[in-house]
Amino acid sequence: MCAAVSSLCPVFAIVGMAEGEAAKSKRILVTGGSGLVGKAIEQVGKDGEGRPDEEWIFLSSKDADLTNAAETRAMFDRFRPTHVIHLAAMVGGLFRNMKYNLDFWRKNVHINDNVLHSAHEHGVTKVISCLSTCIFPDKTTYPIDETMIHNGPPHSSNFGYSYAKRMIDVQNRAYSEQYGRMFTAVIPTNVFGMHDNFNIEDGHVLPGLIHKTYLAQRDGRSLMVWGSGKPRRQFIFSRDLARLFIWVLREYEEIEPIILSVGEEEEVSIKEAAESIVAAMNFKGEVIFDTSKSDGQYKKTASNSKLRKYLPDFKFTPFSQAVKETCDWFVANYDVARK
Ligand code: NAP
Ligand code: GFB
């Protein structure tokens, strides 16, 4: 129901009704609005999920560097949101995490503290932050569920990112206990889709492999898949995650986080994921597994039974269809895609 997408300034868009229509009771600020997940939420709003009483503001790091407390506060002073979807983070795939654990810890701790505390100081009604299933203990029983976040050390490859994300859960509980705030978090599995970071060194496995397959096809070379191909992942399409985020914003009222994931039976190996990309891009060359590269965490199989209790009928996009849409988008947008 997005009647209009108007730009108040070149760096953000407001999705909602046209100016002059009924006053909006919710002003939703999306930090990290220029990234994979933020762009998907914006698109889902434009495609019909918006509501007349909602005004959406999508921010990027150009609007404010959220590692800086003064810039963050000024951004809240300027926009006065009633709701915040907090996505902004230093993000990366396995290999970026392994290189920069300190930066992942420091940047994300600063961003999260600045955003949550500014939201508190500005009396924001509800904040939804974003954790990740990679932050759960490495040594664990499966499937992982929402009660297990703090039960043991995370995988060593991304301890900086993981502990920074875990602290959001600690902080949410503390704002609730001390001030009665409704600050909560969602826990997605590996996300992919349009507007992802397709950088080969820094990005996640699916965008990295899509980019590598594109180049291998163009240059008549083999496709190099890093690691053994045996690790397993549950991938969620960014459009599905965006729809779930909007549901959480409107309906979910627990401080406890909620895992947003496809079912356990949808988990695939990295080899199967690579095969989906090869099929979607019609790649006919050789596929080689470079076992000198790290496999990272073997698996982090998560249960979506809490989500299913709330939304038993939610339909996830089939993995092969979502991979195909993402590959087609990357090829069509090769010149402008982040890479
Ligand atoms: P992304 O595509 O890399 O986007 C990151 C966003 O954060 C961008 O909008 C970026 O702005 C912004 N940002 C980064 N540093 C900032 C700073 N210092 N100040 C202000 N903004 C800053 O990430 P994503 O994949 O959409 O991730 C969104 C959220 O989902 C993150 O919290 C991430 O931890 C979580 N998550 C992601 C995955 C996944 O597989 N991708 C899985 C689980 C959870 P610019 O565009 O201006 O750089
Ligand atoms: O998406 P990814 O980088 O991160 O996937 P994680 C890593 C897995 O894919 C490993 C294999 O088993 C890699 O050996 N792989 C194969 C590749 N080819 C490639 C490639 O070209 N690029 C990449 N990146 N991997 C991340 C965390 O873990 O999960 C982050 O490190 C984040 O913190 C994210 O939260 C959701 O799933 O291992």
Image (tube, grey):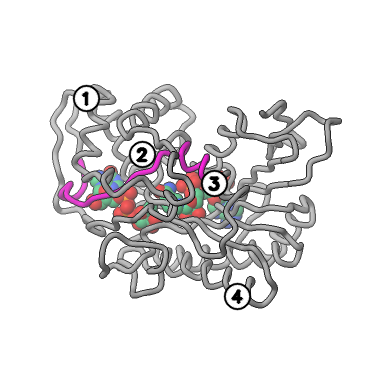
Which residue is more in the foreground, 335 or 243? 243
Residue depicted at 72% across the width and 59% down the height: 124
Which residue is more in the foreground, 304 or 267? 304
Task: Check residue 245 in the rendering and tell me which mark sits there, or answer none.
Answer: 3
Task: Check residue 265 in the rendering and tell me which mark sits there, or answer none.
Answer: none
Q: Name the side, left or right, on which 192 lies relative to 252.
A: left
Q: Where is residue 75? Give x, y as percent.
A: 73, 54
Instruction: Look at discs 1 and 3 and give the one toward the viewer.
Output: 3
Q: Amino acid at mark 4?
A: Ala
Residue depicted at 34% across the width and 55% down the height: 303
Residue depicted at 27% across the width and 68% down the height: 140
Sequence-wise, which precedes: disc 1 or disc 2? Answer: 2
Residue depicted at 17% across the width and 32% down the height: 222
Sequence-wise, which precedes: disc 1 or disc 3? Answer: 3
Q: Badges 3 and 4: C-beta atoms under 8 Å apart?
A: no
Q: Is residue 232 magenta?
A: yes
Instruction: Look at discs 3 and 2 and give the one toward the viewer.
Output: 3
Instruction: Look at discs 4 and 1 and give the one toward the viewer.
Output: 4
Q: Amino acid at mark 3?
A: Phe
Query: Within the image, what quadrant is residue 153 found in?
Result: bottom left
162 in relation to 56, above or below? below
